[in-house]
Image (cartoon, rainbow, N blue to C red):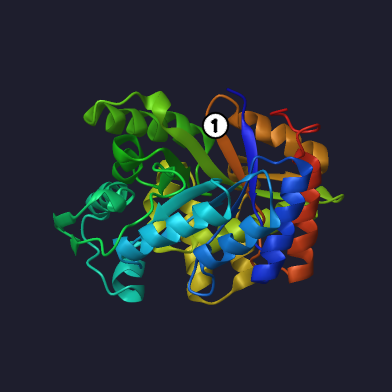
């Protein structure tokens, strides 16, 4: 199957996200995805994006599963699938262990087991109209009795993708999900040597075929007539993620331990310029697609045969909202199906 292309707009506002999703839809991109952080609700933004689009898939990349009760999350998914006319992909993640404990006040132990339990419970809640649900698990407790006559959802199986970085978390997608959402720090080598085997291991654990699991990943991307401008923008976003200590083992695995150490040291000094300067050209080449329009198209070809779906992630670290918007619109033009390497 040919590589399909989506975009995570990174707009400066909810309405801006909707505008950029509409541009992606009009250009024929496969999907528009919305992020979530402490200042952005994935579900609210996705509702706006759903209203502004007609054809493309709309997905969360990611929504925090750990920050919502399963019942609330199931209701949100049901509503979002309705407002998008059945175009929703529910992408779920935990964030780091520190996010789980410090941001959401939850138990950070066994995040993979938590996600597997959550996905299983959401599948049961998709059928809440069929009768009572009783669940007493390690992380979730639910005793639900329908009141009145509940209508069945628009679709009884909304695709659920789970995010993963380390092998055990990636394995979750193979065990219980419809797809994997990979990280911006994935190299093609890491996908081939670690991610795909972990998905296959998870699928075998639950008697599934690996081909039943879609492999999607965020890919840092920037386009500019001056290639060096685009490359430095991607370097800035790489520095942003590499400053997180949680990702140090991943950076070591993919061959960028020394760069990671330098970036974290600069971050400790709050020296943002040094953080970006510590990102090597080799790192930019491995973790992003950046440069002219042709550079971006050529860079995406390396994911053929590895990913089913590439989600272009426009850098925002240290950039103005105007430049982020310009880049997103430029990327949409570059990878519109008539020009895309997937098309």
**Number of numbered callouts drawn:** 1
Quarter of the image with the C terminus in it: top right
Q: Position of residue 253 (x, y in %)?
A: 40, 42
Q: Which of 21 and 72 lies nearest the eye of the viewer?
A: 72
Q: Which residue is rendered at x = 62% and y = 25% of the image?
A: 2
In the picture, residue 212 is in which quadrant?
top left
Quarter of the image with the N terminus in it: top right
Q: Which residue is rendered at x = 31% and y = 46% of the image?
A: 123
Residue to which mark 1 is pinned = 308
Q: Which of 217 and 13 lies nearest the eye of the viewer?
A: 13
Q: Position of residue 310 (x, y in %)?
A: 59, 40
Residue 278 visible, this angle: no
- Is residue 277 positioned above or below 227 on the image? below
Q: Which of 218 and 250 lies nearest the eye of the viewer?
A: 218
In the displayed structure image, the side of residue 205 where residue 73 appears, left or right:
right
- Is residue 3 positioned above or below 259 on the image? above
Q: Position of residue 297 (x, y in %)?
A: 74, 35
In the picture, residue 293 is in which quadrant?
top right
- Is residue 245 positioned above or below 217 on the image? below
Q: Position of residue 222 (x, y in %)?
A: 72, 51
Q: Which residue is rendered at x = 29% and y = 63% of the image?
A: 148
Residue 20 visible, this angle: yes
Q: Which residue is rendered at x = 45% and y = 36% of the image?
A: 190
Crowd class of label 1 (few under 14; some 14 to 19; many from 20; radius 10 Å): some
In the displayed structure image, the side of residue 43 where residue 338 appears, left or right:
right
In the displayed structure image, the side of residue 310 where residue 36 appears, left or right:
left
């Amino acid at each position: 199957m040919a590589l399909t292309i989506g975009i995570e707009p990174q707009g400066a506002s909810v309405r801006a996200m909707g505008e950029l999703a509409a541009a992606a839809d009009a250009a024929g991109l496969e999907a528009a995805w919305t992020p979530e952080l402490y200042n952005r609700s994935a579900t609210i933004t996705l509702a706006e994006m759903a209203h502004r689009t007609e054809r493309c898939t709309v997905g969360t990349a990611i929504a925090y599963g750990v920050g919502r009760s399963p019942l609330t999350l199931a209701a949100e998914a049901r509503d979002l699938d309705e407002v998008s006319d059945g175009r929703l992909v529910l992408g779920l993640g935990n964030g780091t262990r520190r996010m789980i404990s410090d941001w959401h006040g939850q138990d950070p132990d066994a995040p993979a087991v938590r996600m597997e339990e959550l996905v299983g419970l959401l599948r049961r809640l998709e059928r809440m109209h069929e009768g009572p649900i009783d669940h007493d698990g390690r992380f979730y407790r639910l005793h639900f009795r329908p009141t009145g006559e509940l209508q069945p959802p628009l679709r009884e199986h909304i695709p659920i993708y789970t995010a993963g970085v380390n092998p055990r978390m990636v394995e979750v997608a193979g065990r219980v999900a419809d797809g994997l959402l990979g990280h911006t720090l994935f190299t093609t080598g890491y996908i081939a040597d670690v991610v795909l085997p972990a998905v296959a291991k998870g699928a075998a654990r639950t008697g599934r075929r690996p081909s039943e699991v879609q492999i999607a990943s965020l890919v840092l991307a920037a386009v500019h007539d001056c290639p060096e401008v685009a490359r430095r923008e991607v370097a800035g976003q790489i520095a942003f993620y590499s400053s997180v200590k949680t990702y140090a083992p991943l950076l070591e695995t993919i061959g960028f331990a020394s760069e990671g150490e330098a970036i974290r040291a600069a971050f400790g000094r709050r020296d943002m310029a040094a953080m970006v300067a510590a990102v090597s050209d080799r790192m930019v080449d491995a973790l992003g697609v950046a440069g002219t329009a042709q550079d971006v198209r050529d860079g995406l070809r390396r994911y053929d045969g590895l990913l089913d779906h590439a989600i272009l992630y426009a850098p925002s670290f240290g950039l103005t909202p105007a430049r982020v918007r310009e880049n997103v619109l430029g990327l949409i033009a570059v990878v519109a199906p008539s020009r895309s390497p997937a098309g």
